[in-house]
Image: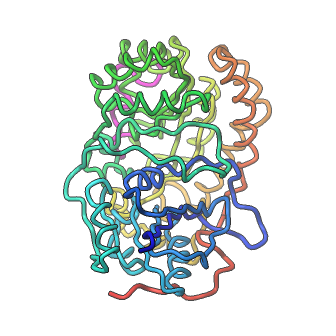
Amino acid sequence: MSAFRLTLVHPCIGRRPGEAYIKTWQMESLPLGVLAGLTPPDVEVRFYDDRTEAIDYEEPTDLVAISIETYTAKRAYQIASEFRRRGVPVVMGGFHASLVPDEVERYAESVVVGEAEHVWAEVIDDWRAGTPKKRYTSAARPSLVRSRPDRTIFEGKRYLPIGLVEVGRGCAFKCDFCAIQTVFRRTQTRRPHDDVLSELAALKGSRKLFFFVDDNFATHAGETKEFLRALAPLQIRWVSQMAIPAAHDEEMLALMAASGCMGVLIGFESLDPVNLAQMDKGFNTMAGGYAVALANLRRHQIRLYGTFIFGYDADHRDSFSDAVAFAREHAFYIAAFNHLTPFPGTPLYERLQLEGRLRYESWWLDPEYSYNTVPFRPAGMAAAEVERGCVAARAAFYSRRSILARGFDAVNRSNGLMWRNFWMINQLHRADVRLRDKWPLGDQSYRKPLLEAAS
């Protein structure tokens, strides 16, 4: 009897005919690596990354699994339609499938709602037996003991040489714009530290820098500190994402620096306390606020990737330049200046829907919507003003003068590897300032109707 064949697909956001994809510097699709690791070893697995390669729809396969996010939903449905036209069934999972499962079910024979660890073996067994269910729901947060990616699916593909490793999943905060708190219900689960350390040790020889992809690396201070103590002897370099409260924990910062932390992504989001309160992120102002937190990070030579979002009710025309000036004054290693996006299922989406402020009911599928379009009506500015303000902020922050000044900051140049990377990363961001503006969701050249799955 021949082996069961599974094809994994990571969809891109979209395409313009005749143009290269919007990003040529991609990182591995860790969620699909984890899914491959959960797949029984006797299943034959293939992987296609739609961002970097053409999908072979004619290659024989028994089941296709697509990881779907809100921005990739339209493209995922196009890909699913092409497989379905060839008689190949499709299962979808990922954040968008958990946020709007009823929608996703229209384009997939099966949908995984929630995390895959509890249900993936059942999905494979059912499809092998010819008795699949329409929906597989993970009723509780699963243990991450078995959650280790199979990186063999990435072999031969071109990705940035950064080791993506998951330590924990989820976040305890309730920021109203964040889909993470919706899907994981404000909880975090963590992998056993020994599992993470053994994975890092195996990858250490082939990676100069690691990215802990946790939604909030420092959610549980005690467990995080225990992990950092165990991590230090490995002598690796790493970056991650965390919330500002951790920057007020002196012991945490010392352990981070001692274990090889090169930088962190922190969501500043706004300089206005009214906005922070509206987004349920008032904790950003605790313990002396930004000034104290930034001084603490600088003292430990931890570089900063700061993010800002615009479109909250207290924002005004000067909000963009104020954020850029702040990021330049504090010599952020890199920074993001994006408009607010209401993801389905979040408190933000529900509020804007109730207030009648959504410009598109399902912006991710609307033919009039494109990347960097504000999909709602802001209170203090026109949507187009917010869009232009974000682009202008990126252009100002990634100007040659700004890059040069930040590049010679004492913290940014305190490590040779990170200083070399600084110039490359900032130039890539400079090239991307307008590259993604008005980029389509889905492939613009795709003219066929989406083929829905049988109900």
> Residue at position x 47%, y 55% from top?
32
Q: Nearer the viewer, residue 383 or 425?
A: 425
Residue 181 position (above or below residue 206): below
Q: Determine which quarter of the picture holds residue 162.
A: top right
- Residue 217 location in percent, x, y? 39, 32
- Residue 446 location in percent, x, y? 64, 81
Residue 241 position (above or below residue 260): below
Q: Main secondary structure of the magenta part?
A: helix
Residue 301 position (above or below residue 407): above
Q: Most extreme residue toward the front, as rendered?
A: 1
Within the magenta stretch, is there residue 284? yes
> Residue at position x 75%, y 30% from top?
423
Q: Nearer the viewer, residue 186 or 335?
A: 186
- Residue 78 location in percent, x, y? 55, 77
Question: Which segment did they paint magenta?
Answer: 276-292
Q: Determine which quarter of the picture holds residue 298.
A: top right
Could you tell whether 44 is left or right of 276 in the image?
right
Could you tell whether 416 is left or right of 185 in the image?
right
Residue 291 in view: yes
Residue 172 position (above or below residue 262): below
- Which quadrant of the figure contains the C terminus? bottom left
